[in-house]
Image (cartoon, grey):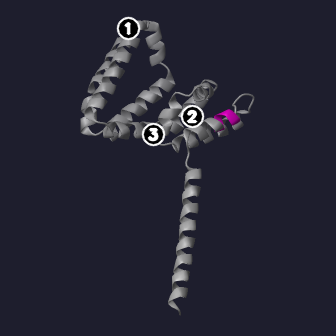
Amino acid sequence: MKPTRVWMMGAAALLVIWVVALGAMWFARSQKMTSEKVLDYISANSLHSKSDVERMKMIEELGRRVNQLSFEERQKLRFEKSIRSAYEGMTDAERARYLDLTLPGGMKQMMEAFNAMEPAKRKQMVNRAVNELQRAQNEGTREELDKALNDQNLKRIIDQGLKSYMTDANASAKLDIQPLMEQMQSILQISR
């Protein structure tokens, strides 16, 4: 075989490999879930005037999509009005199902991000959360506090957060979270 032909075949093989690799990268990126894709799903699939079975299928799919998001994408989604509207449009049972689908993964991601934070930033976040809890405690009435603490979905969130804290937080993060845990314990004792 002539050396020129060997070089041509090698170049052609390399070109085919690059085309396949670029195609695979494009395909992988198109399959990656983003907060925008979740928001598009929400806007295209209103729960309004759907049967119970259809609503549950839509909630299951929404939960599946949310669970595919990275921590950063979940953070983007958190402040979107359409996700809040969709959540508020759910019945209590549907909200519970949605939380059951999305909380474990979300709490795990949050704790992993918290573990990776610089200690100073972690402490700053904990202090802000403690201050917000104290403000809410001081501004709210006893009845409002009791109502909030008796909300089953809030209990689910707290329970999953505590499970994630116990299993996923590293020792340093657990120490940094301690003031927040103490503030939560104080609120729970007041409500008793």
Q: Is residue 134 above or below residue 37?
A: above
Q: What is the spatial separation of the Cα atoms under label 1 and label 2, in whole angstroms?
A: 32 Å
Q: Are marks 2 and 3 in contact (CB under 8 Å)?
A: no
Please indicate whether residue 7 sits to the left or right of residue 173 in the image. Answer: right
Please indicate whether residue 149 sits to the left or right of residue 32 in the image. Answer: left
Q: Is residue 27 above or below residue 125?
A: below
Identified by mark 1, the residue type is Asn
Q: Quadrant of residue 141?
A: top left
Towards the viewer: 75 or 161: 75
**Residue 120: where, in percent of width, then height?**
26, 30
Residue for point 37% across, 32% down: 162
Q: Quadrant of the C terminus?
A: top left
Which of the two discs, 1 and 2, labels the residue nearer the N terminus? 2
Identified by mark 3, the residue type is Phe
- Identify the disc placed on residue 97: 2
Q: What is the spatial separation of the Cα atoms under label 2 and label 3, in whole angstroms?
A: 21 Å
Residue for point 24% across, 31% down: 175
Identified by mark 2, the residue type is Arg
Q: Is residue 87 above or below residue 72?
A: above
Q: Quadrant of residue 137?
A: top left
Residue located farthest toward the bottom when viewing the structure as drawn: 1
Other-residue count near label 3 (Cα within 10 Å), few / some / many at <14 / 14–19 / ≥20: some
Q: Which residue is mark 1?
A: 138
Q: Which residue is mark 3?
A: 71
Residue range in magenta is: 41-45
Label 2 element class: helix
